[in-house]
Image: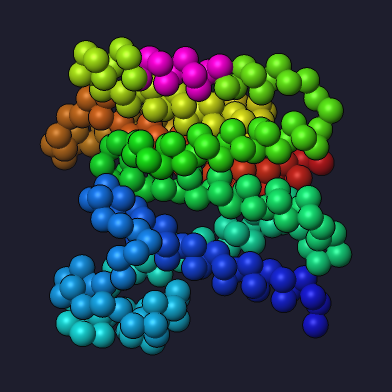
Amino acid sequence: MDMNIFLYAIIFIIGTVFGSFYTLAVYRIPKNIDIIKKHSYCPNCNNKLGFFELIPVLSYIFLGGKCKHCKEKIRPRYLILEILSGFSFVMLAQYLDINIYTLNIYSIINYFFAILYFTAIILIVGIDKEYRKIDRRVLAYGIIISIIYMIYLYTIETTSIYRYAIYLAIYFVLLIIDTFLLRRYAKDSYIVSILMLLNMILIFTGLEKFILTIILTLMSVLIYSVLRKILRKNIGITEFKIEEIQLGFYIGACNIFVIFIANFMLNYYFI
């Protein structure tokens, strides 16, 4: 048996566990429910879930997609997200060229940071999709890990510190704008949060993928706007305002697409 298959199988299982956590966090964080100490429960009957009800993917299959206690149907999106998360973790490993023969401390650290970044993006995408807001706690988490990542890169690379200083300066300026201007005049800080998100993406993925993310985001928003306008005329769907577009969702989703799909296409079809 190829040891790489065994390694990727373990990574896939870890990914499904994280996928289960993502669905929990996206549901709980906006509602200010503890995501660590509070035991998992059925939102319909409030019964605490046992160990065998918390096994990602398998629990859904064995329970027939229903709660063990109240028989309420569990939406299949939870199963789908867990599976997609598992595959995403495997793709992250392949993207970073991690295999059993090249595994070392640096590749493990890089993969660790990739998971932390992926977690921040997924939570931002999920929460913004549901509530059109960038949760400040999730954003703060993303900013902190990006700063730690810059410190790590500076310790192992011989590049100039000025690039990292610019990234930190951007965070600092945006934080000042958010704290002393927007909050003082009770204005929405959504756009400032978006700019912080973009800075975080630039730090983690680099300029090339950052630009591709911006281009893909603009295309996606344009297509959505055109389709919405057509549907409004044909079937009477309600009109929307441009400020209602979930930019965090589009930016995060497009960045994930660029990291996984675009990188795969460039590596395997155009090189």
Look at the image and say whether residue 174 sits in the magenta stretch.
Answer: yes
Where residue 32 sits: x, y (%)? 25, 50
Q: Is residue 94 left or right of residue 242?
A: right
Camera-side residue of 77 and 54: 54
Place of residue 243 in the rendered image (x, y in percent of width and height, measured from the top left): 27, 24
Q: How is the image coloured?
A: rainbow
Q: Is residue 166 visible?
A: yes
Q: Quadrant of the C terminus?
A: top right
Residue depicted at x 19% and y 33%:
232
Which portion, as a residue range, is magenta?
Answer: 169-178
Residue 218 placement (x, y as % from top left): 46, 26
**Quarter of the figure with residue 185:** top left
Which sits in the foreground, 130 or 149? 149
What residue is shown at x 76% (from left), y 45% (from top)?
267
Residue 22: quadrant of the picture: bottom left
State which quarter of the image contains the N terminus. Answer: bottom right
